[in-house]
Amino acid sequence: MVSLIGCSKPGTAPTAPTHGVVRYKGEPATDVRVIFTPTSGRPAIADVDAQGQFVMTTFKRGDGAVPGLHKVTISDRKRNWVQEPGKGPPPSRFPLQYQDVTKTPWSFEVKAGEDNAFELEMTD
């Protein structure tokens, strides 16, 4: 008899609960999307609430992120998603290094079987 432990449905992979808070200069960052990009596998995303809190989603709402090392970035939703016709995007409200996976200082490990909580603090 063959036992398959840890296998998942096709198109999915195991995930671990991943959540936290994003702050800029000590205040909750709002209108932000958080992206956890693993070294391999599917990225996880989350929209931040009014208190700067987020819960990551990879395959289904709130399922977390795949275990392993992640580069973490944000997307300034007011800059990237809300533009007036005929105008370019407004200036970013946050430092650009946090919005570029090749420049972000945030690198975190999501651990399997654990509740992964992260505090993301942006500074100038």
Image (tube, rainbow, N blue to C red):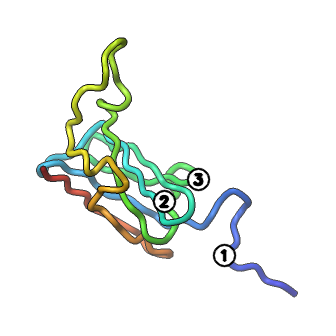
Q: Nearer the viewer, residue 67 or 99?
A: 99
Q: Residues within 10 Å of mark 2 (few under 14, many from 20)?
A: many
- How far apart are the two marked residues, 3 and 2, measured between alpha carbons? 8 Å
Residue shown at 87% from the left, 87% from the top: 1
Q: Relative to 60, is 112 above or below?
A: below
x, y (%) of residue 6? Answer: 66, 75
Q: Earlier in the sequence, mark 3 or mark 2?
A: 3
Res. 96 mark? none
Q: Residues within 10 Å of mark 1 (few under 14, many from 20)?
A: few
User: Element type at marker 1?
Assistant: loop
In this picture, residue 109 sits left or right of residue 64: left
Q: Earlier in the sequence, mark 1 or mark 2?
A: 1
Badge 2 is on which residue? 64
Badge 3 is on which residue? 59
Res. 6 mark? 1
In this picture, residue 10 sits left or right of residue 83: right
